[in-house]
Amino acid sequence: MKLVSPGEAAANSNDIPAEAGEEFVRIGEMAKKYGVTLRTLRFYEDKGLLNPKRDGSTRLYTRRDKARLKLILLGRKVGFSLRDVKQMMDLYDPTGSNTKQLRLALDKSEKQLARLQKQRALIEDAINELSNSMTVVRHMLTERAVPQASAAG
């Protein structure tokens, strides 16, 4: 187990002893690398989505934690709830075929895609309505501006 952070030498006396050559990252690095806040990482830990190692009060994130965070962020980006993300990740079995996990991920993805497509249709309708309204308002302003200009001359 090796703690690595920018600007620190690998031989730093504060390093955790190496276990199978695995490198650990502190919470600040993790947050910076993935563009999240420290609070977000702690929240994901509280929800059981991440499980960093501890060295006293220092959180040390593994390669597994990094992979899980990437999946969490991808899931959130496409609109999955944290509950959905956790359900899918919790089914992962490094020694199995993960068929159940893949089926669940596909099922949830199909449902989310349908929701997103419906949202897109609603947004497109709203954009069209707003554009049409703006055209009417511009036309009204143009009509009202013409008489005022001729009245002044």
Image (cartoon, grey):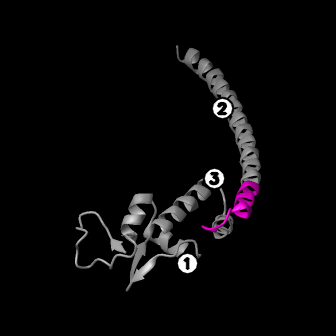
Q: Position of residue 19 (x, y in %)?
A: 39, 76
Q: Position of residue 43 (x, y in %)?
A: 53, 73
Distance of label 1 from label 3 (alpha carbons) = 22 Å
**Quarter where residue 96 is shown:** bottom right
- Specify start and end residues of the magenta stretch as a single range: 93-108
Q: Residue furthest bottom?
A: 56
Q: Is residue 99 magenta?
A: yes
Distance of label 2 from label 3 (alpha carbons) = 31 Å
- Residue type, numbered disc 1: Asp
Q: Nearer the viewer, mark 2 or mark 3?
A: 3
Marked residue nearer the N-terminal end (1 or 3): 1
Q: Nearer the viewer, mark 1 or mark 2?
A: 1
Label 2 Cα crowd, 10 Å radius (few <14 / some 14-19 / many 20+): few
Q: Considering the numbered disc 2 on the image, is that residue within a helix, a strand or a loop?
A: helix
Report the residue marked by disc 1.
46
Q: Considering the numbered disc 1 on the image, is that residue within a helix, a strand or a loop?
A: helix
**Quarter where residue 1 is shown:** bottom left
Residue depicted at 74% across the width and 63% down the height: 100
Label 1 Cα crowd, 10 Å radius (few <14 / some 14-19 / many 20+): few
Asked if the residue at tag 3 contacts the one at tag 1, i.e. Cβ–Cβ closer than 8 Å, the answer is no
Q: Please name the predominant secondary structure of the magenta segment in the image.
A: helix
Asked if the residue at tag 3 contacts the one at tag 2, i.e. Cβ–Cβ closer than 8 Å, the answer is no
**Horizontally, is 125 left or right of 71 in the view?**
right
Frontmost residue, 67 versus 34: 67
Q: Which mark is residue 134?
A: 2
Marked residue nearer the N-terminal end (1 or 2): 1
Residue depicted at 75% across the width and 51% down the height: 110
Report the residue marked by disc 3.
78
Distance of label 1 from label 2 (alpha carbons) = 47 Å
Q: Considering the numbered disc 3 on the image, is that residue within a helix, a strand or a loop?
A: loop
